[in-house]
């Protein structure tokens, strides 16, 4: 966490098992009052629908609180996943 923001350094593959753990940790952060999240995908090799669902879930929870999420450092493969699912239209990709 940086200041009032949560910086999430992701790595490896974000599949069902990892995504479930990540979602619970991030929901706990929201419960503590955090509402700005930056997801760093620099070290992510692959992501499935459950992993994408975590990003969507966190976004849906923080927007009504005046928060937002940001996704940065996407490699071409992961960027393509965001584009195919059209998440790039709803999430700020850097």
Image (cartoon, rainbow, N blue to C red):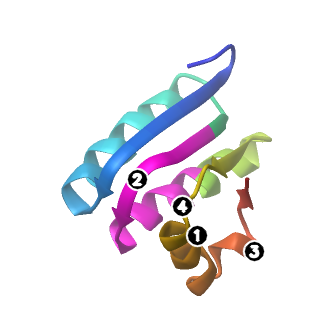
Disc 3: which residue: 89
Q: Is residue 29 above or below residue 85?
A: above
Q: Nearer the viewer, residue 18 or 72?
A: 72
| Residue mark closest to the camera, 4 vs 3 | 4
Gap in Å between the C-alphas at discs 4 and 3? 17 Å
| Residue mark closest to the camera, 3 vs 1 | 1
Q: Is residue 1 magenta?
A: no
Residues at circles 1 and 2 in contact by the CB criterion of under 8 Å: no
Residue 75 tag number: 4
| Residue mark closest to the camera, 1 vs 4 | 4
**Residue found 32% across the figure and 57% down from its top:** 14
Q: Is residue 71 above or below residue 53?
A: above
In the figure, is residue 62 to the left or right of 23?
A: right
Q: Which residues are magenta?
A: 38-58
Gap in Å between the C-alphas at discs 3 and 1? 12 Å
Disc 2: CA contacts within 10 A as few (<14), some (14-19) or many (>=20) = some
Q: Secondary structure at mark 3?
A: helix
Residues at circles 3 and 1 in contact by the CB criterion of under 8 Å: no
């Amino acid at each position: 966490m940086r200041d009032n923001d949560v910086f999430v350094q992701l790595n490896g593959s974000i599949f069902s098992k990892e995504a479930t753990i990540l979602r619970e940790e991030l929901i706990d952060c929201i419960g503590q009052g955090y509402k700005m999240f930056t997801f760093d995908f620099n070290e992510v090799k692959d992501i499935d629908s459950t992993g994408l669902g975590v990003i969507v879930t966190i976004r849906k929870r923080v927007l009504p609180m005046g928060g937002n999420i940001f996704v940065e450092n996407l490699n071409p493969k992961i960027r393509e996943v965001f584009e195919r699912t059209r998440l790039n239209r709803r999430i700020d990709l850097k």
